[in-house]
Amino acid sequence: MTFAIAQLKIPAAILFAAASVSTVFAAPTQSPAAIVEDVEGKAAGIQLMDYVTPGQIIALGPKDSIVLSYLTSCKHETIVGGTVTIGTDHSDVSGGTVQRTTSQCGGGAMALTTQLADKSAAMAFRQVPEDAAKKPIQPQLTLYGRSPVIELKPIGALVIERVDVPGERHDFVLADAHIMHGKFLDLAASGVTLTQGGIYRARVGTEQIVFKVDKQAETGWTPIAGRLIRLQTN
């Protein structure tokens, strides 16, 4: 790169401008603020299980509605009508109504990174139940609903097995499972309820994560932010 610049003798001012433009285009994509749990009516461009980002505007008709679950603030909103502006921890609603509650969630710590996947794999395979008292297994996140929603690549099979005590295991052939929006599996729809206080490993292929179900986790269709696992490394 240095050699090419020297040969072409590009003026410094142009180089500075080009660098500035390059910086703008390289700006990172915003992280999602919330996930759409439900939508009724004709909210343009919005579907069930879409992620929405801060600053995004959603126009609703008078009878249209949308349900949002915020990933970090744990706000749960049911909005009817009006113009919705997505924020970092809640929505601003103009011309409509909003019912807002706060539920328990992991505060956004549901994403699996490659580093966490390696740690999860090491813990899951090294530890055996009889060693649990001496070397407790440390989960990467805690869920507050007993039926996880798992974001994954729907390839092969999903295995969820308890790792703090033996015996509990759930197997899913993803080709036959009910995958929402092409990448989400809701275990509530499959009738699967995990044990309160249990520690589990979820695995698809080489991607896996260890998580805990809170001792007071609720049963059924609880807010998604409290039971979401993003089982993807990219």
Image (cartoon, grey):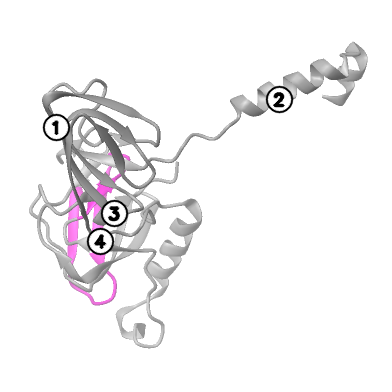
Quarter location, residue 148: bottom left
Is the residue under label 4 in contact with that under label 3 (CB below 8 Å)?
yes
Mark 1 burial class by Cα count in 10 Å: few <14, some 14-19, many 20+: many
User: Foreground mark, 4 or 1?
Assistant: 1
Is the residue under label 1 in contact with that under label 2 (CB below 8 Å)?
no
Quarter location, residue 214: bottom left
Horizontal arrangement in the rendering, residue 190 relative to residue 139 (left or right): left
CA gap between label 2 and label 4 equals 42 Å
Work out which quarter of the rendered image holds the N terminus and state it: top right
Q: How many marks?
A: 4
Q: Where is residue 99 in the image (x, y as percent from the top left)?
A: 16, 45
Give the residue number, with chain letter if any, for mark 2. Answer: 20
Residue lying at 40% horizontally and 37% vertically, measured from the top left: 54
Mark 2 burial class by Cα count in 10 Å: few <14, some 14-19, many 20+: few
Quarter location, residue 163: bottom left
Is the residue under label 1 in contact with that under label 4 (CB below 8 Å)?
no
Mark 4 burial class by Cα count in 10 Å: few <14, some 14-19, many 20+: some
Q: Which of marks 3 and 4 is nearer the N terminus?
A: 3
Residue lying at 31% horizontally and 52% vertically, measured from the top left: 229
The kind of residue tagged 2 is Ser
For mark 1, give the secondary structure.
strand
CA gap between label 3 and label 1 equals 19 Å
> From this viewpoint, is residue 155 visible?
no
Is the residue under label 2 in contact with that under label 3 (CB below 8 Å)?
no
For mark 4, give the secondary structure.
loop
Q: Which mark is residue 65?
A: 1
Give the residue number, with chain letter if any, for mark 3. Answer: 74
The kind of residue tagged 1 is Ser
CA gap between label 3 and label 4 equals 6 Å
Q: Which of marks 2 and 4 is nearer the N terminus?
A: 2
Give the magenta part as a residue range: 148-172
